Image (tube, rainbow, N blue to C red):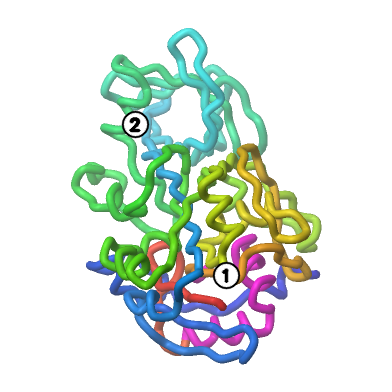
Amino acid sequence: MQLKDFSYFLPEELIAQHPRPQRDASRMMRLHRGAKTIEDDLFAALPKYLERGDVLVINDSRVIPARIYGKKPTGAILELLLLTRRGKNDGEELWEVLARPAKRLKEQDVIDFGHSCEGTVIARLTDKKWLMAFRAKNGFENYLERFGRAPLPPYIRRKKSVDPDQTDDRRRYQTIYAKTPGSVAAPTAGLHFSSNVLNDLLARGVQVASVTLHVGPGTFMPIETEQVEDHVMQPEFFEISAETSQKINAAKRVIAVGTTSTRTLESVADKDGHISPGSGETSLYIYPGYTFKRVNGLLTNFHLPRSSLFLLVSAFAGTDFIRQAYAHAVKNRYLFYSYGDCMLIV
């Protein structure tokens, strides 16, 4: 399959720059795969489409404030996105990072991040990734918690000069049920949930089960191969508890919240759809032609063209049907991407 065939037209003004004032006030498109029908609704109406015996699977990974800014020895500003923590070494924390601009970055460069924090470039790993060692007076984790910014994707524009405490992104680019720190991008389908919606679901007899998948570059890095099949996903850590696996195995329907929950379940399901507890890394890459083993429904945002997330949704609902749905979304002025609206596919 050609990657270029998974493009679509999107007016720039439909890329959401801020979340809606209320989480559950986002719009929700409902797709029925069998009947090929499209309906418009609000996310707050989600509970009426689920029923007793359904299990809603959420990703409880917590986003870390993984975007930081520092000064190179030349005085130039360097923007870093932390990707994967590679351990500690004599008081230093080692991280794989993306750097921008990285053109003149070189090994042994020392970057000043202010507030008694600095980083040293250890090695270049790829054209885009570097290994860096960070040192902070009160610990690097404490530095991140105080001065790190929400790792918003580049299509959401914020001024570098604005103090992170003066924006609401640290709170809103995080699900209300986030628990386990480790993601460097939000599992955005979960951003719509409010306590009211979760309570309404429970009142209807819908069970909620949580998995953990720490969102990393495997999820958000662009596909750079012309052929869809040639792309390779980078591994991401996941964990499924015994309690969650029991709920899912007893479910009438499994509704996955987001592509990360979907990939987690499909990574561990056997050929009969049985889920076993455990943890590890997954590099599962889902694109059209994939046969789903356990997920019966999917709640998801609108994704970038030519992305692995768009391919997963196309695999789940059918490529032609998703093209039709995205055209409907553009025509009806849905908002796209991380802070945008969502769709429920059943």
Position of 190 relative to 136 (above/below): below
Dominant secondary structure of the magenta stretch? helix
Q: Quadrant of the N terminus?
A: bottom right
Residue named by callout 1: 252
**Dot 1 alpha-carbon crowd within 10 angstroms: few under 14, some 14 to 19, many 20 or more:** some
In the picture as drawn, the residue positioned furthest to the left comes out as: 166
Residue shown at 32%/53% (left/top)?
A: 176
Left or right position of 110 against 218: left
Determine which of the numbered discs, if any, sits on residue 95 in the image. none
Measured from the top left, where is residue 78 in percent x and y? Answer: 42, 35
Left or right position of 201 against 330: left
Measured from the top left, where is residue 309 in percent x and y? Answer: 60, 62
Q: Quadrant of residue 266?
A: bottom right
Stretch of the chain drawn in magenta? 302-330
Residue shown at 31%/26% (left/top)?
A: 143
Residue named by callout 2: 144
Measured from the top left, where is residue 205 in percent x and y? Answer: 40, 69
Left or right position of 293 against 22: right
**Residue 70 shows in this picture:** yes
**Mark 2 residue type:** Leu
Q: Is residue 144 magenta?
A: no
Position of 16 relative to 281 (above/below): below
Q: Quadrant of residue 84?
A: top right
Q: Is residue 329 magenta?
A: yes
